């Protein structure tokens, strides 16, 4: 996928990225671009490398080859005189602050309320004052439809509500990019739509998003670009409605036959 807004640089640029876990090569030379404000949905079978790709974008995993840039900045490394040098932890932390990530599991602090969970990052990491962080957290909880649950603890919330708190928590850091790693896969079916509704609102607001998902309806409706991965490579990609209606590769057709 190339940037769709004229000559503007893409928000995410991935070039020849490889990642191994021991002798297992999980990513085998991935090339991908995400334009600013674009929504890229990544689909594929379990073990295809989708989640690993997302984790490499925000440097939760170290790539073994290639380059990843977010908003023009090389992620995880500093390139000097043609050589790559790993960034120091403080610089990595700064980069990660600008990339929000929502996981399958919500990972909320159980001893903090929804409001306190959303406040935590800005206060602890960015040094935002508690009053300002509380005001912003309240705004974000209202945005995700949880204003009335602000003072509830995670154990008092449904899975869908917890995931919406997790989305608000990521947004509290004012990220340039949001990564979603199968955010609805741990939810009961009746709770999926409330999380997807929040993601639709984010996309409509212009947030750049990379979404690993099995929700093909969401990909068709909200995605600007669909990527099908299998065995560590991108097998097929294109406009969601087009590739879902007429997949070219047999492997993709077989996958769709299982999930649609």
Image (cartoon, rainbow, N blue to C red):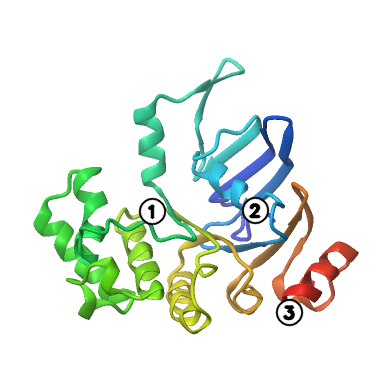
Label 1: how many Cα within 10 Å (few below 14, some 14–19, many 20+): some
Q: Which of marks 1 and 3 is nearer the N terminus?
A: 1
Q: Do the residues labelled 3 and 2 touch (CB within 8 Å)?
A: no
Residue 197 in the figure: left or right of residue 246: left
Residue 183 in the figure: left or right of residue 50: left
For the residue pair 82 and 97, the one nearer the viewer reads as 97
- Quadrant that contains the N terminus: bottom right
- Quadrant that contains the C terminus: bottom right
Q: In which quarter of the image is residue 255?
A: bottom right
Q: Are marks 2 and 1 in contact (CB under 8 Å)?
A: no
Residue identifier under label 3: 260
Look at the picture and state if 140 lies above or below 188.
above
Label 3: how many Cα within 10 Å (few below 14, some 14–19, many 20+): few
Residue identifier under label 1: 175
What secondary structure is found at the residue carrying circle 2? helix
Q: Residue at x 64, y 51 (%)?
A: 33
Q: Which residue is drawn at 35% across and 74% down?
A: 161
Q: Which of marks 1 and 3 is in front?
A: 3
What secondary structure is found at the residue carrying circle 3? loop
Question: Cα distance, mark 3 to mark 2?
Answer: 19 Å
Look at the picture and state if 221 lies above or below 9.
below
Residue 27 in the figure: left or right of residue 113: right
Residue identifier under label 2: 50
What secondary structure is found at the residue carrying circle 1? loop
Q: Residue at x 52, y 61 (%)?
A: 209
Q: Which residue lies furthest to the left in this view?
A: 131
For the residue pair 21 and 208, the one nearer the viewer reads as 21
Residue 155 placement (x, y as % from top left): 28, 69
Question: Cα distance, mark 2 to mark 1?
Answer: 21 Å
Q: Residue furthest bottom?
A: 190
Residue 79 in the figure: left or right of residue 153: right
């Amino acid at each position: 996928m190339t940037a769709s807004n004229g000559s503007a640089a893409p928000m995410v640029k991935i070039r020849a990225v490889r990642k191994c876990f021991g002798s297992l090569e999980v990513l085998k030379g991935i090339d991908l671009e995400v334009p600013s404000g674009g929504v890229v949905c990544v689909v594929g079978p379990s073990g295809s490398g989708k989640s690993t790709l997302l984790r490499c974008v925000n440097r939760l995993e170290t790539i073994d080859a290639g380059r990843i840039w977010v908003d023009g900045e090389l992620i995880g490394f500093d390139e000097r005189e043609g050589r790559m040098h790993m960034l120091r932890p403080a610089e990595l932390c700064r980069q990660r602050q600008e990339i929000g990530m929502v996981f399958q599991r919500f990972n909320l602090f159980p001893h903090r309320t929804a409001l306190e969970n959303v406040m935590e990052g800005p206060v602890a990491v960015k040094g935002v004052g508690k009053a300002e962080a509380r005001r912003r957290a309240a705004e974000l909880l209202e945005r995700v439809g949880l204003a009335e649950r602000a003072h509830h603890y995670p154990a008092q919330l449904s899975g869908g509500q917890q995931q919406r708190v997790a989305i608000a928590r990521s947004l509290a850091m004012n990220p340039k990019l949001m990564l979603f790693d199968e955010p609805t896969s741990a939810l009961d079916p009746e709770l999926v739509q409330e999380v997807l509704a929040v993601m639709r609102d984010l996309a409509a607001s212009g947030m750049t998003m990379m979404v690993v998902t099995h929700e093909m309806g969401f990909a068709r409706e909200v995605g600007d670009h669909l990527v099908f991965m299998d065995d560590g490579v991108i097998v097929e990609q294109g406009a969601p409605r087009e590739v879902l209606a007429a997949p070219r590769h047999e492997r993709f057709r077989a996958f769709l036959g299982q999930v649609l």
